[in-house]
Image (cartoon, helix red, strand yellow):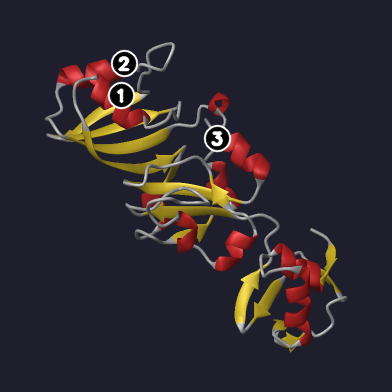
Amino acid sequence: MSKLSLDRILQSQGFGTRKYCRALIEDGDVSIGGEVQDNYKATIETERLVLEVFGEEWVYREHLYIALYKPSDYECSRKPSHHPGVLTLLPEQFTWREVQPVGRLDHDTTGMLLMSDDGPFIHAQSSPKRHVPKVYQATTAEPVTEELVAQLLAGVQLHDEPAPLAAVTCIKRGDNQLEIVLEQGKYHQVKRMLAAAGNHCTALHRSAIGQLELSSLGLQEGEWCYLTPEQLALLTPT
């Protein structure tokens, strides 16, 4: 953390252009500790800084680390084509900060989606070299058999992959329910693996990334939360 001019602070937090942020300050729309700040050149310590903009509190964060409970029929894209984008579920300031999804979930897949404006974090979390396990709950068109589970654990060949892809773990959770843990994160991987094994996925939900479980966050579909350092640590492979 460091000292920055107030207009730079507002800009860094996604409140708009430098010019617009200066106007907000000069118009008396920005306070700190209940005291109006009207000098945009004032240098402010960013550590533990809490701003009030239009009467709403905003904690200064150098970077954003977010978990979203993604609903169905939302696209993980900054430029969606057929469905609303997941960014519409977040405050407008996050778009200004260029928050983006960490990886992708299909438009009809629900569950945990990480989002951030920290480039190195996004790259690290998306890298196949990290081997971060991701837990999926899949609903299948046909009943789950022991043979299906065995195939997914042994590995199935997808037409555009040089080698078979295997689940880390695969557990039958119901007549038409599977819990699958993957590390690779290939395009449509769960759906394509089930199809290659002779079944089909009718619904898919990501319930955990690493050791961070969606159920522990207390979110409903469409809701999001900031991740604490302790929660971020759960994303590191053990």
Q: Which residue is mark 1?
A: 193
- Residue at point 71%, 82% (across, down): 30
Q: Is residue 199 above or below residue 5?
A: above
- The amino acid at mark 3 is Ser
How packed mark 3 is, by other alpha carbons closer than 10 Å (few <14, some 14-19, many 20 or more), is: some
Q: Earlier in the sequence, mark 2 or mark 3?
A: 3
Q: Is residue 108 above or below residue 18?
A: above
Q: Percent from the top left, x then y, of residue 164? A: 37, 13
Q: Percent from the top left, x then y, of residue 165? A: 38, 18
- Mark count: 3
Q: Is residue 157 left or right of residue 92?
A: left
- Residue at point 73%, 70% (across, down): 10
- Residue at point 37%, 36% (across, down): 135
**Is residue 12 at all visible to an observer of this figure?**
yes
What is the C-alpha distance between the residues marked 1 and 2?
A: 6 Å
Q: Is residue 191 left or right of residue 139?
A: right
Quadrant for residue 125, please give it: top right
Q: Disc 1, disc 2: CB below 8 Å?
A: yes
Q: Is residue 30 left or right of residue 238?
A: right
> Residue 60 got which mark?
none
Quadrant for residue 133, please give it: top left
Q: Which residue is mark 2?
A: 156
**Is residue 48 at all visible to an observer of this figure?**
no
